[in-house]
Amino acid sequence: MLKVLVCVSGGGTNLQAVIDSIKDGRIKNAEIVRVISNNKNAYALERAKENGIPGTCVSPKDYGCREDFHKAFLDALREDAPDLIVLAGFLVVLPEEMIREYKNRIINIHPSLIPSFCGTGYYGLKVHEKVLERGVKITGATVHFVDEGTDTGPIIAQKPVQVNEDDTPKILQKRVMEEAEWVILPQAIDWIANGMVEVKEGRCRVLA
Ligand code: GAR
C-alpha cells in the first residue's frame, strides 16, 4: 500500500478528488496518511478531518526565519515516512533538502499545459488570467514530478481543456479543475501506486 502525504494551501478540491478516488477504487493500493497545510484556515484541513485523515498545519508565520520553518515542515513530513508526496495546490517553495530526499517521489498538479503558463508567478487564478490575456484556445492541466526548478520536472500526465470566448478566469479555472485536474491527479497517483510510472533521462513513461 502506497503511503501518500498531501500538501495543501487552500480549498482542497484536488485533495477531495483523491479521497473520492481512493474510496471508489479509481486509485488502488494507496492511502492518504496525512494532510499538511501551511495555512491553518485552509478548507482542505476540514476535508481531511471529515474523512478521518490526520491533518497538520505548519505555518511559516509561526517561525522566526525560513530555515526554522523548513526544518519543522521536514520533520512533519518525515514522521509518516510517506512513499509519495502530492502537492495539491500547495503554494510554498519547497526546501531543496526535501527535493533531494524525495527525488521522483513528489508530484504536483499545475493548472496549464506545461511548458505554457508555468514557472515563477504562475499559480492558481493567475494562470487562467494569463491564458485569457494571451487568447489561447486550448489550455489544460499537468501532473509532473517535482525537481529543483519551478514546474520543470518530468511530466506524468496532461489533459487539454477548451477555452471559450466568454470565459472569465474563475469560469475557466472551474472547467480546468472539473475536466482535467480532478481526473489526471487521481490517475497519476493510481499509476504510481501500481508501479506503472518509469522515469528515465528526465522523461516519464507510463507502462499501461
Ligand atoms: C489548483 O487549480 C491547482 O492546480 C493550483 O492551485 C489550485 C488549488 O485548488 N496549483 C497551482 O497553481 C500550483 N502552481 P484546490 O485547493 O481546490 O485543489
Image (cartoon, rainbow, N blue to C red):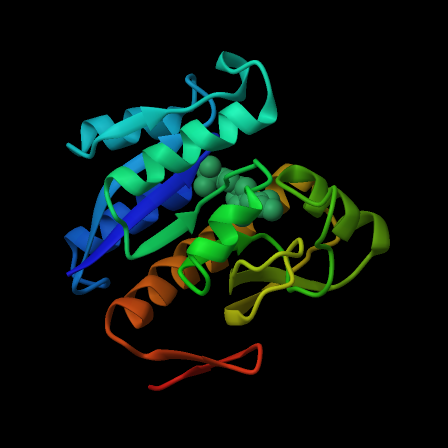
Can residue 102 be seen here?
yes
Q: Residue furthest bottom?
A: 207
Q: Is residue 134 left or right of residue 198?
A: right
Q: Quadrant of residue 45?
A: top left
Q: At x 27% / y 76%, what residue is drawn?
A: 195
From the viewer's side, name the closer residue of 108 and 20: 108
> Measured from the top left, where is residue 198 in percent x and y?
40, 80
From the viewer's side, name the closer residue of 152 and 182: 152
Q: At x 25% / y 67%, what residue is drawn?
A: 193
Q: Quadrant of residue 201?
A: bottom right
125 versus 106 height, above or below? above
Q: Quadrant of the C terminus?
A: bottom left
Q: At x 50% / y 41%, what residue is drawn?
A: 89
Can residue 174 be seen here?
no
Give the tally of numbered discs: 0
Q: Is residue 49 left or right of residue 197?
A: left
> Measured from the top left, where is residue 152 in percent x and y?
65, 63
Q: Quadrant of the N terminus?
A: bottom left
Q: At x 74% / y 64%, what residue is drawn?
A: 137
> Measured from the top left, where is residue 82 in percent x and y?
28, 50
24 versus 127 height, above or below? below
> Measured from the top left, where is residue 5 in percent x and y?
31, 45
